[in-house]
Amino acid sequence: MKTALLVIDIQQALVDAHPAHSDAFLLNVDLLIHAAHNAGKEVIYVRHDGGAGDELEVNTPGWQLYRTLSPKPDEHIFEKRYASAFKETGLKDYLRSCDVRRLVICGMQTEYCIDTSIKAAFEHGFSVVVPSGATATYANPFLSGERLVSYYENMIWHEPLAKVLPMDQALALLGE
């Protein structure tokens, strides 16, 4: 089954706002990207446009991919305006044209764009893998960022919707 790594919304303003476990999260994303590159798997980036005046407004410093991410010249960056990486982006058609059937998904924010994109990927017929510790978010009035990530990994994203794997298993899957 052809697999691609989907890196969603890891943008300067979001990382600068210090999501929970940001250092471990960024390390995990870096490990995933390197594993995908080493195995010849495609890495696809998605970047959110929050509109005029937003911290993620197009062409502002906050909108840029986080400074440690450096897509290769032949890697695609899809721009989005909605929580879903699939809504009006052309991503689904691109993946189908490349015969990608499985997506390993990482990025920000766990309970918004990651959750929506996982559910949309499932609805579009993709097999979805979420590496544990490869999504990040912030505390809210009800839960810490750590608890939100744990809640989604352990209570929401389970088969058939997605398969949450420990990082070592996700890295091995990308290496296949």
Image (cartoon, grey):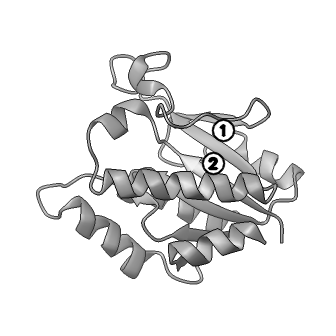
Amino acid, disc 1: Thr
151 is higher (above) or lower (below) than 84: below
Q: In the image shown, does 6 or 25 lie closer to the viewer?
A: 25
Callout 1: 10 Å neighbours few (<14), some, many (20+)?
Answer: some
Quadrant where the image shows the C terminus: bottom right
107 is higher (above) or lower (below) than 64: below
Callout 2: 10 Å neighbours few (<14), some, many (20+)?
Answer: many
What residue do we see at 64% from left, 66% from top?
Answer: 123
Kindly state the secondary structure of the residue where label 2 is placed.
Answer: loop
Examine the image and state in which quarter residue 16 appears. Answer: top left
Amino acid, disc 2: Phe
Residue that numbered label 1 is attached to: 89
Q: In the image shown, does 75 or 172 lie closer to the viewer?
A: 172
Furthest-left residue in view? 141
Residue 8 visible, this angle? yes
Q: Which mark is residue 115?
A: none
Residue that numbered label 2 is attached to: 86
